[in-house]
Amino acid sequence: MPRTPILAANWKMHLTIAEAITLASDIATVAAPYADRETIIFAPFTHLPAVADVLGGKRTALGGQNLYFEKQGAFTGEISAPMLKDVGCQWALVGHSERRQYFGETNESCRKKIAAALSEGLKAMYCVGETLAEREAGLTETVVLQQLEGGLKGFSAMEFHSIAVAYEPVWAIGTGKNATPEDAQTVHQAIRTKLEQLTNEKIAQTTRILYGGSVKPDNIKALMAMPDIDGALVGGASLKKELFKPIIEF
Ligand code: PEP
């Protein structure tokens, strides 16, 4: 079953607003002719309004890198799903490994955040991935499938239309090391089988599963050639037009 690929930029805590405007405009221009793929920019919160202006009416979508699961209230420093929606986001990134590692994100908080995003009409990209120690202990699939179940249990088939999964082995993020396409494919296939248990075969076959972890112009083609890899979530290489362009164009 054909799945429209997604090429997503995670800018993390980088760029000035002026730099973000220029880069967003460049990315939107590169992506414009490609009706057969989706591009998303996950920008820092402070940059969202400016980037939303640049992307307005263009094919490239906008997302927040995190959100809180309550709609509003006394939650100093947090940003809600309605706020992301209000500023022009279509997507929210949930459960990035840096949020799990440094900010105490759990599978359960991720599940609540995904529910909050969907209830506002946002799409959610849910990140899962094992650490190096877990991989070396042979626990990759155990960990990833637990994260998947914990974050995605209880959503309806309808809701799954608004969910994408990003498999990001923690040891490959920002390290220059990446999983071989075959290793990534093995985990993606296991994720798809798990999705089938959590939902049904049709949803499992249509859910996009992205790979993330040191994706670069020189490895994107081989990754995208794998049957269960439906796109890439890109950190470092999304911060430079000359690196992200060939990734979009893979
Ligand atoms: C990421 O932040 O999601 C990521 C995959 O980073 P990088 O591409 O730099 O490894």
Image (tube, rainbow, N blue to C red):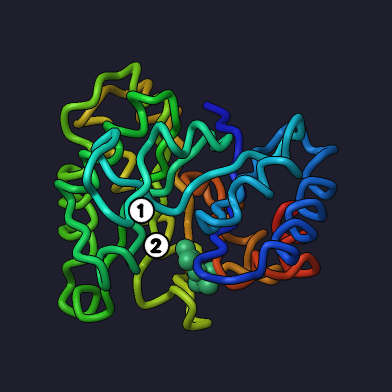
Q: Is residue 214 in view?
A: no
Which label is found at residue 177?
none
User: Above or below — where is 112 with respect to 223?
Assistant: above
- At horizontal 68% and vertical 48% (from top left) the residue drawn is 51
User: Above or below — where is 140 with respect to 35?
Assistant: below
Q: Nearer the viewer, residue 27 or 68?
A: 68
First in sequence, mark 1 or 2: give its number.
1
Q: Is residue 54 left or right of residue 93?
A: right
Disc 1 from disc 2: Cα separation? 7 Å
- At horizontal 53% and vertical 44% (from top left) the residue drawn is 63
User: Above or below — where is 139 with respect to 177?
Assistant: above
Q: Tell me the kind of residue under disc 1.
A: Cys
Residue placed under numbered mark 1 in the picture: 127
Residue placed under numbered mark 2 in the picture: 168
Q: Is mark 2 within 8 Å of ligand 1?
A: yes
Q: Nearer the viewer, residue 65 or 202?
A: 65
- At horizontal 15% and vertical 51% (from top left) the residue drawn is 146
Q: Tell me the kind of residue under disc 2.
A: Glu
Q: Element at badge 1?
A: strand
Q: Quadrant of residue 53?
A: top right
Q: Quadrant of residue 34?
A: top right
Q: Quadrant of residue 88?
A: top right
Which x, y percent locates residue 191?
31, 46
Which x, y percent locates residue 38?
65, 38
Q: Is mark 1 within 8 Å of ligand 1?
A: yes
Q: Is residue 226 in view?
A: yes
Quadrant for the C terminus in the image: bottom right
Question: Circle 2: is it few (<14), some (14-19), or many (20+) Cα within 10 Å?
Answer: many
Name the residue furthest top.
158
Which x, y percent locates residue 172?
43, 75
